[in-house]
Image (cartoon, rainbow, N blue to C red):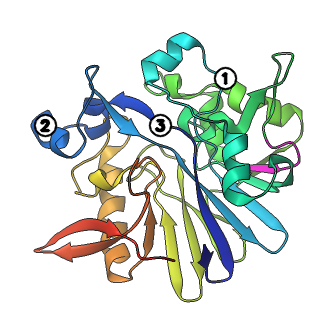
Amino acid sequence: MLFGDFRIEIVSDTEFGLDGGAMFGIVPRILWSRVSPPDEQNRIRMNMNCLFIERGDERILIETGIGDKWSEKLKAIYGIKRKRSLRESVEKVTGYHPEEITIVVNTHLHFDHAGGNTTLDERGHVVPTFPNARYFVSAAEYEHAENPLERDQVSYMPEHWRALKENEQLEFKPADYEIVQGLRMENVPGHNRTMQCVRLESGGRTLYNFADLVPTSHHIPLAWIMGYDLYPVETLAAKKRLLPQAARENWTCLFYHDPDMPLCRLVEEDGKLRAIEHAAL
């Protein structure tokens, strides 16, 4: 798909499930279950919609999904339903081999955003999934990942980034920076202090990847905030700032965890915002 001067594609990793109560925080189950029905273990369907961006010689992958370094026990806990590896999905969707990806970017280093940074080789050793890529993450997020809080330490698994550092592929970036002209990372506190969102601007159009600020289209209502967020009041402030702007300016919105409608736009009706399927790009 063309987006101004860029080619973009959605590379979906795999479906998995997280507890619906945790995903919707203070919202009562009677409300969130209407739009996101849970399974018998109270898990809701989720996906990981990685964003491929190509311009010139750069082939960029934003996020790497959940990865494949999981025991059978953890696969069962998270309801991981993998049909093919991320490497296979990248090649199928983009037409490029994993060796041809030049830049990989993580908005933050939680296992469901950075798990596919690395994989296991035939000897069972952890190695970079994209062996020729530069991997970008904010320096502040890296420091937090290496020294997490008790509340979020379960979300950080060092095997997703330490092999990259040892291989000298990991590059530490500031809170806000430009990957290539027109493609920027922006620090948006709330989920934690150091998560970033993605802004792509080209040809008078904007694509905004909300990462875990608004994980699915069902999280558009302002108070529908994940229980996982360390700073929910800051999440609320960011949503109040960004979502109305997205509707006014007709942004293409990417909701990373949405299993059905990852790309959409927002419209306001009767004072409320809702997502509608985006027309062909």
* Label 1 with label 2: CB-CB less than 8 Å: no
The mark found on residue 69 in the picture is: 1
Residue identifier under label 2: 28
Q: Residue at x 31, y 71 (%)?
A: 266
* Above or below for 154 versus 172: above
Label 1 neighbour load within 10 Å: few <14, some 14-19, many 20+: some
Q: Position of residue 222 (x, y in %)?
A: 23, 57
Q: Which residues are magenta?
A: 130-136
Left or right: 189, with 273 as reference point: right
Give the amino acid at mark 1. Lys
Instruction: Residue under label 3, please give it.
Output: 15
Which of the two discs, 1 and 2, sits closer to the camera?
Answer: 1
- Secondary element at tag 3: loop
Q: Quadrant of the N terminus?
A: bottom right
Residue 195 colored in magenta in the image: no
- Secondary structure, mark 2, is loop
Q: Which mark is residue 49?
A: none
Q: Position of residue 183 (x, y in %)?
A: 65, 71
Of 165 and 60, the residue lying toward us: 60
* Residue 137 visible, this orientation: no
Is 78 above or below relative to 257?
Answer: above
Q: Amino acid at mark 3?
A: Glu
Going from N to C along the chain, the mark reached first, 1 or 3, is 3
Distance Cα–Cα, label 1 vs label 3: 15 Å
What amino acid is at disc 2?
A: Pro
